[in-house]
Amino acid sequence: MAFFLTGFPGFLATYLVRALNQRDRGSRFRLLVHSSQAEAAQQTVKRLVHEGMGPQERFELIPGDITQELLGLDSVTYYRMQLEVTHLFHLAAVYDLAVPAETAYQVNITGTRKVNRFVRDLRNLKRYVYFSTAYVSGRRMGRILESELDQGQNFKNHYESTKFEAERLVQALMSSVPTTIIRPAVTVGHSTTGETAKFDGMYFIMRFLDRFRRLPIPNIGKGQSPFNIVPVDYVVKAAAHFAFIHSAVNRVYHLTDPSPHTAREVYTMICERLLSKRPFFTIPSYFVSAALSLAWFRRWIGVEKETLEYFHSPAYYDTAHAQKDLRGTGIRCPDLKDYIGNCVEYYQKHRNDPGKRVKVR
């Protein structure tokens, strides 16, 4: 089998390569790499080989760009991929909550449209696995089913709206292409090692608390809504499993925590492990939102304003399809309280690593 991945050497794509290797140690990897990531991709492949994943020849780094015609491939390579690729995993996207509209559209929508064209040309394709996000639900509230997409919702940011439009494009292929769609929640580091590539998402809380560690720590708003978090190892193991089972054809899966903690519970757990103290008073969330409207303040604490809205988003993601098709595999989403300590410890060791900091606008 030959696995074609976009988004390499990104965090999720690299872990997915490892998970796919566990399922098929004889497979070959065709890894589409943007020119800006060429050196990082070479280093990542060396690391994978060092981990025992076989000879370097097993991994082909293919220069390309999902926003270009033919994905930026020359005609010879394009034709060869048509014959070789059996499974395509589309992970390339802009994951920035504060991304400008034009950039989000170009990568998330135009890029997915061009990947879809590539998919239709693959002659031996067994599965197209598209990585969407649970947050295509936008500002919807209440129970959200895996079978639902367009419910007339509006969106919190350009990331959500463009991923929604991209998923619509992929769902339109389902009648002619064997497709599986993955919708992860906020994805954090490995549940055992804590390793992550960037300190965004949940790690914005750690950065916020770090700035005020010597002061009394407040709660922010009521924090009663669920804050859905999943570790990267759960996401890639589940996705790798779904890529090879017939019941996953033309299905959408919420890879979300079926029993999420509330935003306040997550905030408190992080505070206890990072600062060894608990919040003991509450400030209104609108106060923090106003402060984050100031660019200098956002940059000083290293937190995007768009993050705050996820603290009071009363959405509950139904995981019936995922739970059914993972039954008996041993793959399950661990409770955050059982691995949050590993995530905090990793953050503490690497908090000053400039490569892991997210540039705040």
Image: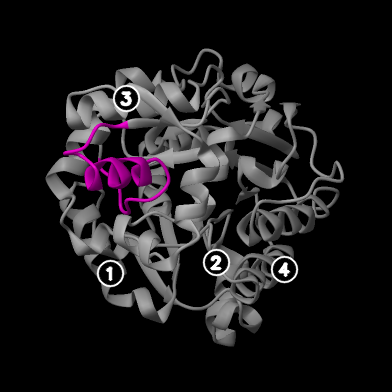
Front label number (4 vs 2): 2
Other-residue count near label 3 (Cα within 10 Å), few / some / many at <14 / 14–19 / ≥20:
some
Q: Callout 2: helix, strand or loop? A: loop
Specify the amino acid type for callout 1: Ala
Residue at the top extreme? 328
* Label of residue 99 in the image: 2
Spatial distance from mark 4 to mark 2, Cα to Cα?
19 Å
Q: Estimate the spatial distance between the alpha carbons at disc 1 and disc 3, rounded to whole Å.
A: 40 Å
Residue at mark 4 to residue at mark 1: CA–CA distance: 26 Å
Q: Tell me what residue is drawn at x 68 percent, y 23 percent.
A: 318
Q: Secondary structure at mark 1?
A: helix
Whether residue 249 is visible, yes or no, is no
The tag on residue 163 is none
- Identify residue for label 3: 279
Q: Residues within 10 Å of mark 2 (few under 14, many from 20)?
A: some
Q: Nearer the viewer, mark 2 or mark 1?
A: 2
Residue of label 1: 40
> Which residue has dot 4 on it?
113
User: Along the polypeptide, which appears first: circle 4 or circle 3?
Assistant: 4
Tell me the CA gap for discs 2 and 3.
31 Å
Task: Indicate the quadrant where residue 314 lies.
Answer: top right
Please state the horizontal and vertical placement of residue 264, each as a whole percent of the image.
45, 24
**Residue 152 place in picture, x, y as percent:** 87, 46
Q: Residues within 10 Å of mark 1 (few under 14, many from 20)?
A: some
Dot 1 or dot 3, earlier in sequence: 1
